[in-house]
Amino acid sequence: MCAILGACNISIDRFKSALNLMAHRGDDDSNILEVDKYKFGFNHLAIENLNNNTQPFFKDGIVIVFNGEIYNYKEFGENESEAIFRLYKKYGVEFVNKLDGMFAIAIYDKKLYLFRDIFGKKPLYFTDSGIFSSEIKAIISLLGYTPELNFSALAEYLSLNSSIAPNTIYKGIYKLPAGCYFDGKIHKYYDFKREVIDISENEAIDEIDRLLKNSIQKRLQSKVEIGSLLSGGIDSSLIATLMPKGVKTYSIGYDGYENYDERKWARLVAKNIRSNHTEVSMNKEEFFNNIDKVIKAMDEPIADSAYIPAFHLAGNIPLKVVMSGEGSDELFLGYRRYEEFFEFQNSNVPNKMWLKKYLERHYEDIKEWEVFRRFFANEPIFRGINEVFFQAQIDRILKTKGKSKGKKDGVIDVDYERFLPFNDSFDFTYFDIKVWLGEVLLMKLDKMFMANSIEARSPFLDKELVEFVFNLPENIRGRKKSLIKKVASKYLPSEIINRRKKGFAYPFLEWLKEENQFSYILTINQKTHLFNEPYLKEIVKSGHKRYKQHIWSLYLFSRWIEKKI
């Protein structure tokens, strides 16, 4: 794990300064190589090759820098850089299909090529001028100015919690989409497909069990100690259980807020597997003390409130590598809201167009109204498990309602249809792997943990395992995580398997309200004039009864943009 940086026609002092902005991503070593007026930088977090930093790699006129882990590198070379070089020499850009791992790779071979892993676990940003970097802040440092706000990305943020690749919140700075490479243009080299197989439920359970164990075993590849995050939910508990005995596990909770605190469940699992368990607590003061640090580590606004406790937890982990349970809910339909969308899929209501017209004459500014409107209009209902602002709300908040010519420069309708390829329940999985996981949760693991020099690994998001799940018949995959619960029943106490699922919740809105922070949104908007003030006041005045996630999205964005004005 590390930071990579590249740019041409930049002074060495400016380049070093930009590279130093990412020292937290690897403080064991740092190197710079210059070839053909192009500079390549690398900050090294030693995990696999502790005393042998091979980057930037230079051989036969080819330069390679990469961030991540290649789990199958020993099949092709003595180290990861050598493996990438040999594969690239043999297969050209198709080499990337031979890799098993999480990575952001830059190859310079008379021209620049960029590659990103199939899930987007490792970030990679670039510009039209040839700069690339693991973090946006280094690019802005090299540019020497802060680019303008990208309103198309802002609309995506309001709807989907983050800008969506190739957009970033900045005009002219792009992020490479997952499963793509760049050679002057963006090309897709991999995507998830469905080729339904004939298999029984028991066979599927056994195969998932085998694939998950293999995935964990691959990710135990390291010369340093590896721990595991443990929330007490089924996913992190199963991973911790399948790791070596005595593994160090870590959980976070909130003293005095029992409804949010899941440490008792983590404690139960830790006792069951005899892990070396550590509990961390976060209070209101620590929450506010961490916000600016989190926003700096984000680089661009991402509206998942769990970034703050993740950052706080990571700051209390004395290891370089941890495992995490991301991916299971999306693969095995664990979110309760999936069930609501299933009900719509299976409904047959007469006179839908009449009902659509009725709804449109009786507008309500709530998600339920919008979902029914889509249903009656025969539009795709599902637009991500954590959609926040729907399109009518985006138009209102950005002052664009009913004014196609008056829209802010670059504002467009959020494109969700590109993430709905299958026309069945696997659309839920595909959409959320691409958006909620790829743009939000995996960036939380990378940005919050790498800000504390920790690499986080996600065993559920293993290519072979995910491909197997995508090929399952719908009735075999089931719903409500039924399949993974049957795998877990071999290893975990029944009270862990059967307890009601809780999200990564904590009292952040209570804390904001106690400190009168809702009005901060209005104060910052009076400086930026970005949002429709009457509608903004309507949202803020509500407290958080109707607009809980809306308020957090607006608050986080306000804290972020305040640093830019």
Image (tube, rainbow, N blue to C red):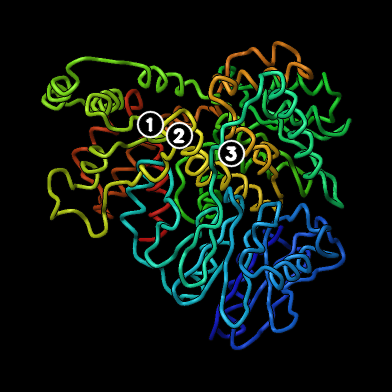
What amino acid type is highlighted by mark number 1?
Phe
Which of the two discs, 1 and 2, labels the residue nearer the N terminus? Answer: 1
**Could you tell me which secondary element the residue under label 1 belongs to?**
loop
- Other-residue count near label 1 (Cα within 10 Å), few / some / many at <14 / 14–19 / ≥20: many
What amino acid type is highlighted by mark number 2?
Asp
Please name the residue that numbered disc 1 is placed on: 382
Residue shown at the point (39%, 40%) measured from the top left: 553
**Could you tell me which secondary element the residue under label 2 belongs to?**
helix
Image quarter hosting the C terminus: bottom left
What amino acid type is highlighted by mark number 3?
Glu
Which of the two discs, 1 and 3, labels the residue nearer the N terminus? Answer: 3
Q: Quadrant of residue 286?
A: top right
Residue shown at the point (84%, 61%) measured from the top left: 49
Tag 1 near tag 2, CB within 8 Å: yes
Query: Is 513 drawn above or below residue 23 in the view shown?
Result: above
Residue 419, position as x, y percentages in the image = 42, 42
**Could you tell me which secondary element the residue under label 3 belongs to?**
helix
Please name the residue that numbered disc 2 is placed on: 427
Query: Is residue 496 toward the left or the right of residue 270 in the image?
Result: left
Q: Which mark is residue 121?
A: none
- Other-residue count near label 2 (Cα within 10 Å), few / some / many at <14 / 14–19 / ≥20: some
- In the image as oriented, which residue stretches furthest toward the front? 198
Task: Say which of marks 2 and 3 sits in front.
Answer: 2
Q: Quadrant of residue 42?
A: bottom right
Residue shown at the point (61%, 43%) measured from the top left: 311
Residue shown at the point (77%, 44%) measured from the top left: 219
Residue 164, position as x, y percentages in the image = 43, 51
Q: What whole-number distance in Å separates the C-alpha atoms at marks 1 and 3?
A: 36 Å
Query: Is 362 drawn above or below residue 227 in the view shown?
Result: above
Query: Is residue 168 toward the left or the right of residue 529 in the image?
Result: right
Along the line of sight, which residue is nearer the eye, 317 or 88?
88
Query: Is 2 drawn above or below residue 525 in the view shown?
Result: below
